Image (cartoon, rainbow, N blue to C red):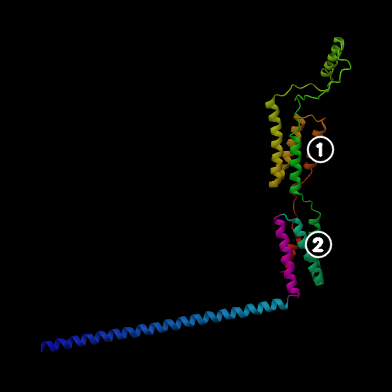
Amino acid sequence: MKTAIFSLFIACTVLLLSLFQFEKYQKFALNTQLSQKKLEDEVNLKLETAQQMMNKQTQITQRIFTESDGPLWKMAEIDYLVSAANARLLSREVNTAIRLLTIAQEKIEALNDARLTPLYQAVTKDRDALQTLSMPNLTALWRNVSTLMEEASQLAPRGTLIINTESKTAAPSQAADSSWQQKFSETLSEMKDLIKIRHYSKPVEPLLSESEKRLIQLNLQTLFETTRLAILSEEPTIYLQSIQDLKQWLAAYYDDTQSNVKHIDTALTELNAITLRPEIPKLSSIDLLTLLR
């Protein structure tokens, strides 16, 4: 009897557990269906949104192609050209900016709209102002300074002893048995060539030692190198100061009566007149386009 009751209890317990598991499975299945339905709705919504965006983009593209020859598109093109020219001026590409403004000027003229006359005049004024701007050729300028630097390395500072070693070929003796008087006369003639008396209007400076001469030449080359670096970095203040220092150094330690010293000094004067970094004017057409946008 007890065994039957125990078996019945076990059977009821298994039945209750089965019912509980079945209910739990039903809830899980229902939640899965709801999640799947929610996911499908989200996917469908995203697909619908993407389709709408694609349709809108297609309409915009069609309108662009339709209005590609219209005033609206042309004004956008003019705006882009002037803005690009202004951007080029920030990197000091003046020639490129002039070409862009010329194209913009032609575009405005092609529209044949009297309302754009102020814009046409502003673009023309900006282009003309840039054309009158004198931009130095930095590459050519650097090469010119390098050439002068090479020439200056051959200069001899004042106080340097220059020995003129000219080879003389002895004339053949007409008589093999020349007398001692003739030999003495030839010796006196050679001594006269070695001893020369010169008159100087300036006081005679003492001769330089080799270390002093090297120091003067090294400083001259350093000043030239500073000038070249100023050109590469576009530093007008350093550029002008180094040229002034070069002229003063030449005047202080080199003979300005020599032709090669005069040539270098004249070339430095010409370099001093060059504006290394001229000021670039602001485009007035940029402000005008801002008002028209």
Identify residue for label 1: 266
| Residue 199 or residue 177, whichever sits in front | 177
**Label 2 is placed on what type of residue?**
Thr
Closer to us: 159 or 250: 159
Residue 289, horizontal then vertical, whole percent: 73, 66
Using the numbered discs, state the Cα–Cα distance from disc 1 to disc 2 in whole angstroms: 39 Å
Identify the secondary structure beneath mark 1: helix
- Residue at left 73%, top 45%? 142
Residue 243 is situated, as x and y percent measured from the top left of the image, at 74, 39
Residue count near mark 2 (Cα–Cα under 10 Å), binned few <14, some 14–19, many ≥20: some
Q: Secondary structure at mark 2?
A: helix
Hey, which quadrant is residue 90 in on the image?
bottom right
Question: N-terminal of the two: label 1 or label 2?
Answer: 2
**Comparing labels 1 and 2, the label whose residue is closer to the camera:** 1
Q: Is residue 5 above or below residue 76?
A: below
**Does the magenta segment cover residue 183?**
no
Magenta span: helix, strand or loop, mainly? helix
Looking at the rendering, in which quadrant would you find the N terminus?
Answer: bottom left
Q: Going by the image, does 14 lie left or right of 195?
A: left
Q: What residue is shown with label 2?
A: 124
The amino acid on which the numbered mark 1 sits, given as a three-letter code, is: Thr
Dividing the picture into quarters, in which one does residue 66 lie? bottom right
Q: Which residues are magenta?
A: 68-91
